[in-house]
Every structure is written in structure tokens, then in C-alpha cells.
Image (spheres, helix red, strand yellow):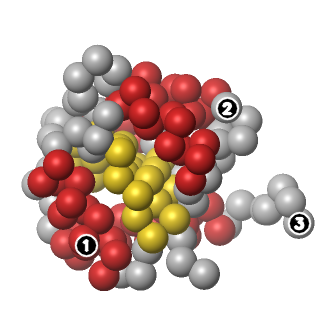
Amino acid sequence: MKKKIVVVEDEQDIADLVKLVLETAEFEVVTVLDAQDALAQIKMVRPDAILLDLSMPKINGWEIFKQVRSDPAYAETPIAILTAKSEAFDEMVGLHVMKADAYITKPFGKQELIDKTYELFAKRKKQPDPGA
């Protein structure tokens, strides 16, 4: 069964590119262009992972990240930050303070995107399954 990924990205071209690349790697991808719709789509799709842009109008990605993590149903869902913020400080905050599972900077290479997405699942696989 294909892993489902929700990509929250407000730029249509980037969302389409991410979808295309990840679908070639056999993932099922749903894109969400509006941050306000992100939480509803996440609940509807029940993804295995989320790729989340930080810089979006109205609601920023950090707010969505916090809301997803605060919901017990999605607290353990792997989240990769997908952002143009490439400073070491931003990455440190994302990975060590916010506890994102991966940090992918734009522009990214096709293989980098695929590898980091697979890593999301590899990290979570090491943890015991609460439903088992």
C-alpha cells in the first residue's frame, strides 16, 4: 500500500513539482494550497506524513505544525519542513526546538526530496507501533 503524504504549500508550481516527484517514488500525494484548509485536509486524508511550508499567508507553517502536534491523533505523524529558510539557525529551530522530523530547503533536488521523505518513515519505523 502506498504511503499517503499531505503537502501544504501555497505556491502552485512548487506543490505540483513536489507531487510529481513523490508520485514517481510511489507515494500517494495530496496537495493543499491554503493553510486554512490544511488541518481539515489532514484530518480527512489521514496522511502517513506531512510536508509543510513555513512561509504562507494568513496562517504560517509553524502554527499548523503546532496544531497538528497538539492533536493526539496526529502527534506522531512525521512532519518535514519544506522551506526557503536555509540559515543554520532556522534549521536548528525546526529540528531541535519544534521537533520536526526533517528539514528540506528550497530549492531542493529531486533525489534529496525523495530521500528525505523515505527517511521520515525510516525514523518512525524504529518506534513501537501503539496499535500493535
Q: Which residue has dot 1 on it?
A: 21
User: Quick check: marks 3 and 2 in contact, CB under 8 Å?
Assistant: no
Q: Position of residue 17 (x, y in %)?
A: 18, 63
**Residue 35 circle label:** none
Helix, strand or loop at mark 3: loop
Question: What amino acid is labelled 2 in the image?
Answer: Asp
For residue 61, which quarter of the picture?
A: top left
Q: How far is mark 2 from mark 1, CA to CA?
A: 29 Å
Rendered view: 69 above or below 81 = above
Residue 51 at what x, y percent from top left? Answer: 38, 50
**Quarter of the image holding residue 33?**
top left
Above or below, 26 against 11 in this view is: below
The residues bearing labels 3 and 2 have C-alpha atoms spaced at a distance of: 20 Å
- Point 44% across, 37% down: residue: 38
Q: Residues within 10 Å of mark 1 (few under 14, many from 20)?
A: some
Amino acid type of disc 3? Ala
Q: Is residue 31 left or right of residue 77?
A: left
Location of residue 44 in the rendering, given as x and y in whole percent from the top left corner: 59, 47
Q: Front-most of 99 and 14?
A: 14
- Please, which residue is most extreme toward the right here? 132
SS label for mark 2: loop
Amino acid type, label 1: Val
Q: Is residue 33 visible?
A: yes
Question: CA gap, disc 3 to disc 1?
Answer: 32 Å
* Sequence-first disc among 3 and 2: 2
* Camera-nearest residue between 54 and 100: 54
Going by the image, does 7 lie left or right of 46?
left
Marker count (numbered): 3
Q: Which mark is residue 132?
A: 3
Q: Who comes first in sequence, dot 3 or dot 1?
A: 1
